[in-house]
């Protein structure tokens, strides 16, 4: 199971707008859903080059970092609504996910991660002895 990590994200966005701060990394929007035995997480990263994306897992914490370069640097900006700089997001991965087998794909500005459910967390059949050498199967 995936758990949300940043309860103050909206507050941070508001203060950045009010004070035009750039010290805290920008947030990347995310969708997450379960597809069978896999959790799928998608991040919107428009304008980011694939080689600037960095994924790291440490103690069931997945960190996604990406950088979008400022394309108007050195020019007189008329309007600058698109943020540039470093984006960072952390997800806490539950014990039931297999963090060693994460698959990542980046296409059309969307980073898609596929995180399989760990084998030990999947439902399995257990043989139960019914006495006199007989056994039957039940779902665990």
Image: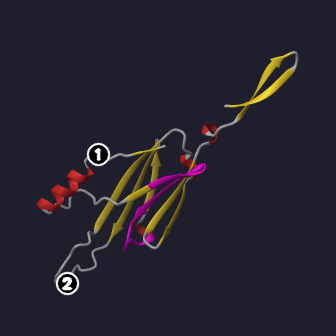
Task: Report the mark closest to the observer, 2 or 1.
Answer: 1
Q: Residues within 10 Å of mark 1 (few under 14, many from 20)?
A: few
Q: Look at the picture and state if 100 lies above or below 135.
A: below
Q: According to the image, label 1 marks what residue?
A: 7
Q: Assess whether residue 41 is covered by the magenta stretch.
A: yes
| Earlier residue among tags 2 and 1 | 1
Do the residues bearing badges 2 and 1 touch, measured as CB atoms within 8 Å? no
Observer-nearest residue: 29 or 20?
29
State the separation of the CA atoms marked 2 and 1. 37 Å
Residue that sits furthest to the bottom in the current view: 75
Q: Residue at x 49, y 62 (%)?
A: 112
Q: Assess whether residue 40 is covered by the magenta stretch.
A: yes
Residue that sits furthest to the right in the current view: 133
Residue 90 x/y as whole percent: 38, 50
Q: Residue at x 66, y 31 (%)?
A: 140
Observer-nearest residue: 51 or 64?
64
- Label 2: element kind: loop
- Corner quadrant of residue 122: top right
Magenta-highlighted residues: 32-50
Q: Seen in the image, is 117 located left or right of residue 69?
A: right
Observer-nearest residue: 57 or 32?
32
Residue 1 x/y as whole percent: 49, 43
Q: Seen in the image, is 40 located left or right of residue 81?
A: right
Residue 50 x/y as whole percent: 45, 70
Q: Residues within 10 Å of mark 2 (few under 14, many from 20)?
A: few
Q: According to the image, label 2 marks what residue?
A: 75
- Label 1: element kind: loop
- Corner quadrant of residue 22: bottom left
Q: Look at the picture and state if 21 lies above or below 72.
A: above
Residue that sits furthest to the left in the current view: 19
């Amino acid at each position: 199971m995936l758990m949300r990590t940043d309860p103050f994200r909206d507050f941070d966005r508001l203060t950045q707008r009010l004070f035009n701060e750039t010290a805290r990394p920008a947030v990347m929007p995310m969708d997450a859903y379960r597809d069978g035995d896999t959790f799928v997480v998608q991040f919107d990263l428009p304008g980011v080059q694939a080689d600037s994306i960095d994924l790291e897992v440490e103690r069931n914490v997945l960190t996604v970092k990406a950088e979008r370069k400022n394309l108007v640097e050195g020019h007189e900006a008329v309007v600058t609504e698109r943020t540039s700089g470093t984006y960072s997001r952390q997800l806490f991965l539950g014990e039931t996910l297999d963090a060693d087998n994460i698959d990542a794909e980046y296409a059309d500005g969307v980073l898609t991660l596929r995180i399989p459910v760990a084998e030990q967390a999947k439902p399995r059949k257990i043989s139960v002895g019914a006495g006199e050498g007989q056994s039957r199967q039940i779902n665990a």
